[in-house]
Amino acid sequence: MVRGTASMNGSVRLIRLAVVLATMLCLVPPAVAAEGRSVIGMPRQGESALEFLGRSDQDGPTVTHYGYLTHLFGLGDAALFSDLTTRTEATARFTFSASTTLTARHEVGNMIVTAAPGTLTIYFNDTPGSDFTQPGSFAGGQAIATFSVRYHNILNVQAPNEGIATAVADLVQLSASAFTLNGRHHRLGHQGFQLRVRATGQGTRTHVDPVKAFFLLGAQAIVP
């Protein structure tokens, strides 16, 4: 009986040890353990992964999006800019560029609802220098993450050629590449990672037919 109890106690201790070891392994992200680099942009469910400021240009069915990140989970906000006193697109280390094509457009009253799929890429710029007057400048630097994207936009027309835009976009990550910032190696997300973007801003139409317009947007991406 005593021998059986001792054996049982030993088994319990082994189980407890296994649980502790498993817990410790779960606390260490696999990418960090295997590759020696930190994984950023991956908070807990419902938390903000990244925030950005941007512009979207519509030319007929084609909409081009570009801008820069103002917050990225895992990095201090100051690390996102090369100049701590001037936090604009000109000093932003992380920029994005995307292209989408409208597949749906519905209109009733002063509401215009559209949807468009496409691809978005985030770039790391060791030497920043983007400019909103040059959309292509946001696609410079090192491509560190690509996403498939589908957005749904609601435009509430407030006056001729002016409206308030509210959009939701679903992102699924297609690729992730390591980069180095201040001597440390990082990776943004991983393949298959999903984000939900919520954006709001101002839309201005500049041409009627074909439709040409631009939107200034602020947005937040959370883990759904």
Image (cartoon, rainbow, N blue to C red):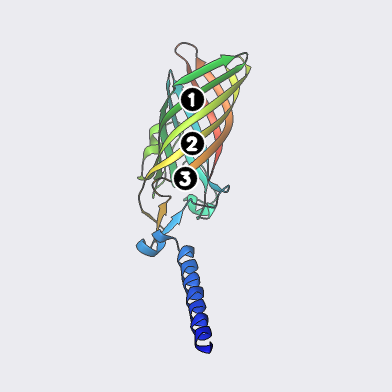
Pair 3/1: label in front = 1
N-term-proximal mark, 3 vs 2: 3
Which circle marks residue 115 in the picture? 1
Which residue occupies the foreground of this view, 18 or 197? 18
Q: Give the residue furthest to the bottom.
A: 2
Label 2 Cα crowd, 10 Å radius (few <14 / some 14-19 / many 20+): some
Which of the numbered marks, if any, corresponds to residue 170? 2
Placement of 113 over or under 83, stated as above or below: above
Binning the other alpha carbons within 10 Å of mark 1 as few (below 14), some (14 to 19) or many (20 upward) gives some
Could you tell me the amino acid type at mark 3?
Answer: Ala
Do tag 1 and tag 2 residues touch (Cβ < 8 Å)? no
Assess disc 3: are there few (<14), some (14-19) or many (≥20) residues with their C-alpha within 10 Å of its C-alpha: many
Q: Residue at x 47, y 43 (%)?
A: 194
Q: Under tag 2, what secondary structure?
A: strand
> Where's the C terminus, which quadrant?
top right
Query: Earlier along the polypeptide chain: callout 1 or callout 2?
Result: 1
- Determine the image quadrant of residue 63: top left
Reading the image, the residue beneath label 3 is 92
Residue at 56% of width from left, 15% of height from top? 107
Residue 25 falls in which quadrant of the image?
A: bottom left
